Image (cartoon, grey):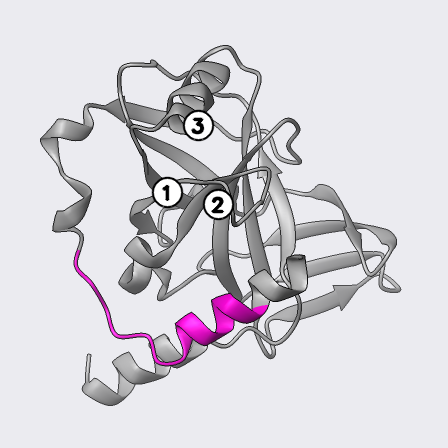
Amino acid sequence: MTDTDLADLEAEQSAPTRAIELRAVTDFDVRYADRIIELVAIPYDNDAAALVHGRAVVESFAPGSFAGVERRANRVKVNRDHDPHRTIGRAFALHPSRTEGLVAELRIAQTILGDETLALAEDHSLEASVGFAPMRGGEHWLENRSRRRITKAFLEHIGMVPEGAYNGRVLSVRSAAAAPLEQATPVATPNLDEILAWFEQRST
């Protein structure tokens, strides 16, 4: 991959065209003592009901919808209830090319809220949810605009919420001590901080 190709990927993954939307995944099996959780954040080719611009539609994500997001995995925060002021961790790794969907490895911080989140997830009282925005040219309407197919999307954050939209699953849980979050490779994402600040202002 050339420097130009890398710059194009980073530009695409740092420039969503619209406001952030939220989609959730269900079915957790979490051990409280382990802090890195691997899960399917968004399944591919899986129909789910969604509310788009105030209208109920059937929505699905195409394989590779989040291509390039792995290059900024450690910039994707994890929070409670999609609240940017209640951060509980961040992504350790993102795998957009898995056949089952966008696979995320999350590390939950050792804080009171982080411990509470793990306990509630272990009790099946919380689910994973993503905040995303369709990229330019990555949204396709079908069947008289009753269906929406996402082919290119920006991942803004991952939240832990009471209810989800998809029947996802945890793939594995392992000890955070085996792979410290600080080892994640930082990437250059021009203007990302400004974009995230804009999203935060819109949510207040």
> Which residue is labeled 1 in the image?
104
Residue drawn where x is 34% and y is 28% of the image:
111
Tell me the magenta residue range: 185-198
Quadrant occupied by the C terminus: bottom right
Question: Can you tell which of label 1 and label 2 is closer to the viewer?
Answer: 2
Q: Earlier in the sequence, mark 1 or mark 3?
A: 1
> Which residue is labeled 3 in the image?
113
Residue drawn where x is 89% and y is 64% of the image:
144
Q: Is 158 drawn above or below residue 108 in the view shown?
A: below
Q: At which x and y percent is residue 150? A: 61, 61
Indicate the amino acid at tag 3.
Leu
Question: Can you tell which of label 2 and label 3 is closer to the viewer?
Answer: 3
Q: Which of marks 2 and 3 is nearer the N terminus?
A: 3
Q: Nearer the viewer, residue 1 or 12?
A: 12
Quadrant occupied by the N terminus: bottom left
Q: At which x and y percent is residue 106? A: 34, 38
Residue farthest to the bottom, as pictured: 4
Q: Quadrant of residue 132?
A: bottom right
Q: At which x and y percent is residue 28? A: 48, 20
Q: Are the residues flagged by discs 2 and 3 in contact, CB closer than 8 Å?
A: no
